[in-house]
Image (tube, rainbow, N blue to C red):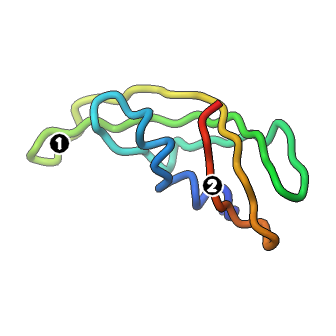
Amino acid sequence: MTHIEQYLITCSELSAVCAENGCIDSRSLDCEILEQNDHHVLAFVQFEEVLMEDTGRVVGRIAHQGRLRLTLDRYGRVERAELV
């Protein structure tokens, strides 16, 4: 798993997209790099939001997709992300 994928699994920008306050299914996360340079990445991201009852039972899934602009530090790790 790349630094970018690790960041995306827990980033607040993707969590904010979740419509029903569910969680991101990390197994469904797919990230396609559209543009990249030393300091920025434009990525197309797709994932499923998992909806659960209070008991922990999965009751549904919602597919999400969108573009993120990621700002990288000098080591190639994500410093910041924004939905575009």
Q: Position of residue 15 (x, y in %)?
A: 42, 43
| Residue drawn at the location 49% of the way across and 50% of the way down | 26
Determine which quarter of the picture holds residue 38: bottom right
* 50 to the left or right of 17: left
**Distance between the Cα atoms at labels 2 and 1?**
33 Å
| Residue drawn at the location 78% of the way across and 47% of the way down | 41
* 17 to the left or right of 56: right
Q: How many residues crowd mark 2 within 10 Å: few (<14), some (14–19), many (20+)? A: some
Q: Is residue 81 above or below residue 50?
A: below
Q: Secondary structure at mark 1?
A: loop
| Residue drawn at the location 67% of the way across and 60% of the way down | 78
Q: Amino acid at mark 2?
A: Arg
Q: Position of residue 46 (x, y in %)?
A: 58, 34
Q: Secondary structure at mark 2?
A: strand
The residue beneath circle 2 is 80
In the rendered image, the quadrant that contains the N terminus is bottom right
Q: Is residue 3 above or below residue 60?
A: below
Q: Nearer the viewer, residue 33 or 69?
A: 69
The total number of labels drawn is 2
Determine which quarter of the picture holds residue 79: bottom right
Q: Amino acid at mark 1?
A: Arg
Q: Are marks 2 and 1 in contact (CB under 8 Å)?
A: no
Mark identifier at residue 32: none
Disc number lying in front (2 or 1):
2
Q: Nearer the viewer, residue 24 or 77?
A: 77
Q: Position of residue 24 (x, y in %)?
A: 42, 44
| Residue drawn at the location 79% of the way across and 73% of the way down | 75
Mark identifier at residue 57: 1
* 78 to the left or right of 58: right
Q: How many residues crowd mark 1 within 10 Å: few (<14), some (14–19), many (20+)? A: few
